Amino acid sequence: MIQVALVGCAHIHTPGFAKRMQERSDVNVKTVWDHDEARAQRWSAKLNAARVAEPSSIWSDDTLDAVIICSETDRHEPLVRAAADAKKHMFVEKPLGLAAADAYAMADAIEAAGVLFQTGYFQRGNPHHLFLKEQIEKGSFGKITRIRHINCHGGSLGDWFTPEWLWMTDMTQAGVGAFGDLGTHSLDILMWLMGDVESVTADIDMGTARYPNCDELGEGLLRFKNGVIGSLAAGWVDVAQPVPVLVSGTEGHAHVDNGQLYFKSSHVEGADGAEPWTDLPAAWPHAFELFLDAVGGKDVPLVGAHEAAKRSDVMAALYKAAQTHTWQQPTR
């Protein structure tokens, strides 16, 4: 039985993670901690777990295999460093850091500890993304000339964050607003497909201004080190998202439209782009499930700690670019 502690219960995905753990026969949530005592009490009761007053008792508990860190983003670094010192495997909800410095410091500590790490970049396991990665690596698109990813929902329109998750609309705690919150998923897919980023620029907007301390939408432009130009859009003010991804090259093209992938390539028989392409890889389990599987001893794909840190670095550069109306480079 995998023994787990929930360290921080602030993130909007906490209920989903709790449900996943409760549905697994191989996972037991032993302890819960949060700096907000009422929140800790609520989640310890829901999970039938002991509530601890200080996280130090979690770090010293040798029976715990892993920790799930769902705190506010500005609380990640001390918790991650302590978990690394205690040699606890850790799932840390995205984004890893507020910006580059804290994210790389955490990644260094995680890798030095030699523990398993995972964050919530679940979109890698989407069959469309797996297929695109496979075809890019095979050269089916020729020279890629542009790539775009979009991740939007109507969270502001529906006021999903009031009252329990309002900290996510405060950039001093979250580090980002809507553009960074959802855009980090698009950024992860773009970097997973294209590699490291050379420079970025962006325009980020308050949108409806429902939340005075954060943005609600944005568009980013990225130049990758391989020369490809990419773009991403993200926000909490969309009523639909019919076309989430597009890849265009000199010898091929692919896009997703309302859940259907259309693929055209001179290198692949039958890929004329006229009808939905259905020969796709199987979906991966959710990123959170993959982490629990890894702790249980399975060999599964995880996000590297420095991969997660680079996403925080590039996102911070996108925000700086939007503030200064310039192109910016990540720190690494």
Image: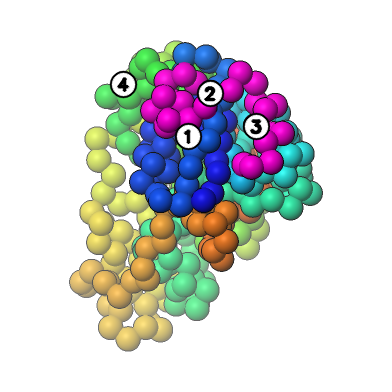
Can residue 203 be seen from the camera position used here? no
Magenta span includes 310: no
Q: Residue at x 26, y 49 (%)?
A: 242
The disc, 1 or 3, on the residue closer to the chain's N-terminal end is 3
Point out which mark residue 51 bears.
2
Is the residue marked by circle 3 packed among few (<14), some (14-19), or many (20+) residues within 10 Å? many
Depth order, front residue of 58/8: 58
In front: mark 2 or mark 1?
Answer: 2
What SS does tag 1 mark? helix
The disc, 3 or 2, on the residue closer to the chain's N-terminal end is 2
Point out which mark residue 64 bears.
none
Identify the magenta region.
40-64
Q: Can you give x and y, in whole percent of width and height, for residue 68 in the image?
A: 55, 38
Of the residues shown, which amino acid type is indicated by label 2?
Arg
Task: Point out the residue furthest to the left here.
Answer: 275
**Mark 3 — residue?**
58
What SS does tag 4 mark? loop
**Mark 1 — residue?**
181
Magenta span includes 52: yes
Q: Can you give x and y, in whole percent of width and height, for residue 87 in the image?
A: 72, 44
Of the residues shown, which amino acid type is indicated by label 3?
Ile
What SS does tag 3 mark? helix
